[in-house]
Image: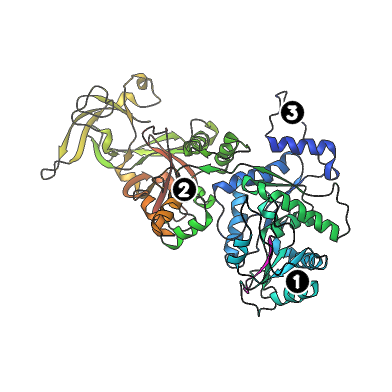
Amino acid sequence: MCTPPESTTEKKETLNFIEQIVKDDLAAGKNGGRLQTRFPPEPNGYLHIGHAKAIAMDFGIAEKFGGVCYLRMDDTNPQKEDHEYVEAIERDIQWLGYHWGKVLYASDYFQDLWDFAVALIKMGRAYVDEQSSEQIAQQKGTPTRPGVESPYRNRPIEESLRLFEEMNSGRVEPGKMVLRAKIDMASDNMHFRDPIMYRVLNLPHIRTGNRWNAYPMYDFTHGQCDFLEGVTHSICTLEFVPHRALYDLFVDWMKETRGEDLSDNRPRQFEFNKLNLNYTLMSKRNLLILTQEGVVDGWDDPRMPTLSGIRRRGYSPESIRKFIDKIGYTTFDALNDIKLLESAARTDLNERATRVSAVLDPVKLIVTNYPEGQVEELEMQNNPERPEDGTHTIEFSRELWIERADFKEEADKKFFRMTPGKETRLKGAYIVECTGCKKNEATGEIEEIYCTYDPSSKAGTEGSNRKVKGTIHWLSVGHCLPAEVRNYACLWTCENPRDAIKDYEEANGVRGIDAMRPFLNPNSISINKRAFVEKFLLTRKAFDYLQFTRTGYYNVDPDSTPEHLIFNSTVSLKEDKHK
C-alpha cells in the first residue's frame, strides 16, 4: 500500500486538489491502496513548457505519495512520429529531474486493442462504416440536434469482422473505411455518437514496421492502455473533461470482455488546467512549421518554448519547477504572465549563477598613472550568495575595456558612473577619477577615455572604505577574450498568438507560416560579436549558468568552443517594467 512520507516539520501540509484526491483514495484503500500514474506524450515533436506542468503533476504526485509513474509514448499516428522525438522526450524529463518506472508505448498494446475491437464487433458494439469523413461529420448532428445513424450501423457482424480484417490488409485506401463504436447517436455527449475506433493509414510504424495498416484512435487507446498497465489515476488537462465518460465506458467494456470485476480495479481520470503563457505559442504543429520554415534554428532554438529551447536559453530545471508551483493547479484555464516565469528564473539563478565580467559594447579606458606593463591578479567571488563556490582570478592592467554606456562626457546629477572630474569605483579594483576622453575627428565617436587611479583605494584594503557613488565593471584589454553574445526577446508581438493566428487565418484564408508572419517579432534575436569576456570563462562548459555583472543572466551555448565563445541571454537582472 502506498502511504505519503511522514512530514519532518510542524508546518501544515498544503495540497492541490489532485493531491487531495490521491491522498483520500489511498486512505480509502482504492485500487488496493496502489498509486500509479503515467505521462503519455505523442512522439511527434519536442516537449514544451506546457508539458512541464503535466510532467510535474504525473511524476511529482507519484514521487510525493510513494507511487510510481510510467512514461508511455502515445505512438498511434505513424505519419508524424520519429525516434528523434522519443529520445528528446526522455532527455527533457530527466533534465527536469524526474524518473519513470518503465518506458512503455501504446504500440505495445496494438494486439490487445485489436482483439478488444474484434470482441466488441462480435458483441454488436462496433461496426465498419464505409462513409467518407465528411458524411460521418454531417451525420453527427450538433449539441442541440441528434445525429443520424449510419446506413452501415446495423450491418451483419460477420461482414464487419471481414471488413475489419480487410482494413489491416494494406489493400484498403485510407479514408474508405473506419471502425466505429455503436453507442448512441442521440446522446447529449457528442463523443458518444458512434466514435471512430480505428482508421486505415497504410503507413509503416517506427516500432512495429509494416505489421499494422489500421491504427487505433486516441480515445480508443488511452483508457485501455491505462487499464492494461494498472494505472490508478489518469491525470489529464481540461480539454479531456468531455472525453471522460467515453474513457470510462471503454474501460468498462474492456473489463467486461475480459470477464473482470467492474468495481474498484480501474483507472480514474481527473483533469487540471493547462499551462498557458502570454506571448508564447505552444502548439507542436505550429512549432514544427517554425522549424521547417527556418524562422527558428531548430527545436532547441532559445526563442522556442520547448524544454530543449528553454534549457539552451539558460533556465534551470529548478526554476521551471518553482514556476509551476507558483501558478498552481485549478479547474479553469487562464493565461499566465511570462513575467512570472522570468521572476522564478531570476530568483533561482541569483543563487546558482557564477558572477563574471563581460563588456558588451566596449570602449577603451586608459589608467594613465598605472605603470605600463604591470599586471595585478585580483580575486573575485564566484557567487556572493554561495561563499562555498569560491573565487576566481581576474587581471587588472593599464588598459581596460568598459561599457560605452558607463561614460558620459556631459552628465546630469543622476548619472553616477564615469564622467570627467568625478570619481568612480572599478568593481573589485580601484577608485579612479576621469580626466577626459579622445574622439574620432570624423565621426565624433569616443575612442578612448582617460583616468587616474588611487593606489590606496584597492578593494579589500583600508583605503577601500572611501565611498563613491558609482561602480562599474571592466576587463583588462590584454587579458580577456572576444565572444559572441546572443540576446533574445519574445518571438511574438501579440499577447495571445494562438488566437491572433486563428483569427488571421479565418479573415484572410491563409494557413501555416503565412498566418504567423504578421505576428513574428523581427527583433527576437540580436547577435553581438564585439563583446569581451573574462578568460575564466574558458573553464565553463555548455549550459553553465552565469551572471554577467550589472547586465543580466546568461549561459554557455552548446555550440561554444574555446576558439569561438558563444553566450545566450536568459533574463535581465531586474524586471523591465516598460518591456
Q: Earlier in the sequence, mark 2 or mark 1?
A: 1
Span colored in magenta: 195-204
Asked if residue 200 is among those painted magenta in the image, a careful observer would answer yes
Instruction: Name the image quarter holding the N terminus.
Output: top right
Q: Label 2: which residue?
A: 499
Q: Quadrant of residue 180?
A: bottom right
- Label 1 Cα crowd, 10 Å radius (few <14 / some 14-19 / many 20+): some
Q: Label 3: which residue?
A: 8
Q: Amino acid at mark 2?
A: Asp
- Label 2 Cα crowd, 10 Å radius (few <14 / some 14-19 / many 20+): few
In terms of secondary structure, where does tag 1 sit?
loop
Q: Residue at x 19, y 28 (%)?
A: 420
Mark 2 vs mark 3: in front: 2
Q: Earlier in the sequence, mark 1 or mark 3?
A: 3
Q: Label 1: which residue?
A: 155
Q: Does residue 344 appear to the left or right of 260 in the view shown?
A: left
Residue 23: give x, y in percent of width and height.
77, 36
Q: Is residue 90 above or below residue 57?
A: below
